[in-house]
């Protein structure tokens, strides 16, 4: 049995397979509103056969945006565009997920394709808006970034309420799954990590204190969404910097998340810096973050998602067969090949009739595919066969 194509269930949601299109910011929203670009972009992943399609990190507040191009769910008007996106995704058999976020001390950056750094005067001339970021402490993310204003207790309550309000809007927009972004140096992870949190109140210092605000947000969101709706959390399992957040912290944190009703921990890493530092301990390679998904799954007894340089069907399948994760998240490979899931099914010999492809495409692939199968050839060879048959 190929596990990658086994169904997966989380609360009331069943996924047709274990392939997830990982959240990817496209920096192409207008004032937080999605555009036709997003319909095409997300629709094609659902047509491509993934089980769960993530809409990119979406801001819970205007000033929580990482870039001026981030989508948001901070006002009701933003629901309708997202509803069109979820409708399209679901009409092609995938489930729709959204990642909700507050950028914290990394908010107000350039759109990735315009430099990915702090906004320049030129960006402002081009119409980008600049604002002072907020964070746990008054320590900037890196050189050139704004010094954040530390959140007051009222400020924390406001951010928590914004996560709740955005989650309720995500439910109204038809999403099946919500993921809270607690990775990559954004607001919630910067509370967790000792590299960014220097508070001396109940929200800083000990691990318990640093976990307090992210857990408060989790509890509030869980209480605000239907009990049938899965809640995922993405974490940076390690900071990759000495003295930063470590895997042991992640295991403790994942246990707490589980107690609060979180259904899956999506295990990324990095993205957070101590000023002047780099991710010195990081070496990338295929599946390099899988050991974190594995340990958290075993030691916190919670479902995990593996992500990071998982590009081949065989690697994805091996991770699942070895029980190291429950879902496989893929980002860049999906940009390269949105039909990856269909190709993986073919790789494992699971489709002899292009079942699962959109019927608008599948009928003619089937026409050639049946004959190819009879010849013992791969469906990937359809083009050669079709050419020969013309
Ligand atoms: C264009 C792009 C945008 C991304 N945006 C997000 C995001 O919105 N939220 C997030 O958690 N990760 C984001 N990521 C990280 C991916 O979700 C993923 O964790 C990372 O790319 C590693 O997976 P891969 O090797 O399959 O690309 C982004 C990655 C890319 C390439």
Image: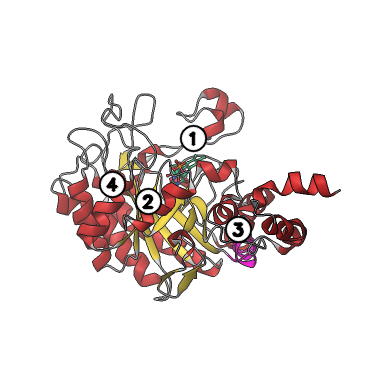
How is this picture coloured? secondary structure
Q: Nearer the viewer, residue 249 or 130?
A: 249
Query: Do tag 3 and tag 4 residues touch (Cβ < 8 Å)?
Result: no
x and y, in percent, of residue 154 in the image: 30, 55
Q: Which residue is mark 1?
A: 130
x and y, in percent, of residue 59 in the image: 47, 51
How would you rate the neighbour count of disc 3 (Cα within 10 Å): few for under 14, some for 14-19, many for 20 or more? many
On screen, 320 above or below 102? below
How would you rate the neighbour count of disc 2 (Cα within 10 Å): few for under 14, some for 14-19, many for 20 or more? many
- Which circle's residue, 1 or 4, is located before the other in the chain? 1
Query: Do tag 2 and tag 1 residues touch (Cβ < 8 Å)?
Result: no
- Which circle's residue, 3 or 2, is located before the other in the chain? 3
How would you rate the neighbour count of disc 1 (Cα within 10 Å): few for under 14, some for 14-19, many for 20 or more? many
Query: Do tag 1 and tag 4 residues touch (Cβ < 8 Å)?
Result: no
- Which circle's residue, 2 or 1, is located before the other in the chain? 1
Q: Which residue is mark 4?
A: 291
**In the drawing, what numbered circle is on residue 68?**
none
- Determine the CA span between mark 1 and mark 4: 39 Å
Residue at horizontal 26 percent and vertical 40 percent from the top = 137
Question: In the rendered image, which quarter is residue 372 located in?
Answer: bottom right
x and y, in percent, of residue 32 in the image: 56, 49
Q: Which residue is mark 2?
A: 306
Query: Do tag 1 and tag 3 residues touch (Cβ < 8 Å)?
Result: no
Query: Do tag 4 and tag 2 residues touch (Cβ < 8 Å)?
Result: no
Q: Is mark 4 within 8 Å of ligand 1?
A: no
Q: Which residues are magenta?
A: 83-93
- Which circle's residue, 4 or 2, is located before the other in the chain? 4
Along the horizontal axis of the image, is 165 left or right of 158? Answer: right
- Determine the CA span between mark 2 and mark 1: 35 Å
Residue at horizontal 38 percent and vertical 29 percent from the top = 145
Q: Which residue is mark 3?
A: 46
Looking at the rendered image, the disc whose residue lies closer to the viewer, 2 or 1, is 2
């Amino acid at each position: 049995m190929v596990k990658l194509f086994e169904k997966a269930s989380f609360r009331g949601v069943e996924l047709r397979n274990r392939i997830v299109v990982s959240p990817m910011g496209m920096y192409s929203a207008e004032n937080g509103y999605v555009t036709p670009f997003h319909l095409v972009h997300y629709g094609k992943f659902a047509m491509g056969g993934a089980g769960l399609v993530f809409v990119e990190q979406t801001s819970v507040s205007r000033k929580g945006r990482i870039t001026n191009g981030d989508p948001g769910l901070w006002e009701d008007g933003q629901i309708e565009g997202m509803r069109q996106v979820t409708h399209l995704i679901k009409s092609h058999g995938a489930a729709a997920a959204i990642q909700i976020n507050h950028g914290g001390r990394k908010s107000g950056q350039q759109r990735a394709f315009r430099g990915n750094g702090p906004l320049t005067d030129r960006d402002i001339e081009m119409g980008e808006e600049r604002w002072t970021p907020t964070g746990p402490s008054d320590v900037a993310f890196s050189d050139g970034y704004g010094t954040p204003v530390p959140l007051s207790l009222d400020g924390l309550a406001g951010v928590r309420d914004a996560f709740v309000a955005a989650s309720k809007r995500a439910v109204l927009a038809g999403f099946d799954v919500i993921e809270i972004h607690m990775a990559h140096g954004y607001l919630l992870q910067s509370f967790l990590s000792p590299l960014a949190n220097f508070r001396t109140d109940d929200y800083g210092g000990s691990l318990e204190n640093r976990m307090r605000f992210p857990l408060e947000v989790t509890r509030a969101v869980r209480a605000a969404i239907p009990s049938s709706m899965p809640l995922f959390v993405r974490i940076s399992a390690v900071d990759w910097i000495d003295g930063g957040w470590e895997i042991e912290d992640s295991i403790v944190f994942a246990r707490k998340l589980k107690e609060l009703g979180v259904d899956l921990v999506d295990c990324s890493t990095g993205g957070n810096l101590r000023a002047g530092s780099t991710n010195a301990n990081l070496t990338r390679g295929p599946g390099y973050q899988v050991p974190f998904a594995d340990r958290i799954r075993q030691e916190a007894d919670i479902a995990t998602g593996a992500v990071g340089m998982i590009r081949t069907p065989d690697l994805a399948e091996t991770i699942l067969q070895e029980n190291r994760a429950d879902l496989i998240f893929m980002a860049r490979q999906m940009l390269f090949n949105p039909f990856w899931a269909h190709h993986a099914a073919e790789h494992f010999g699971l489709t002899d009739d292009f079942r699962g492809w959109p019927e608008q495409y599948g009928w003619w692939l089937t026409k050639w595919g049946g004959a190819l199968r009879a010849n013992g050839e791969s469906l990937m060879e359809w083009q050669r066969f079709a050419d020969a048959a013309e």
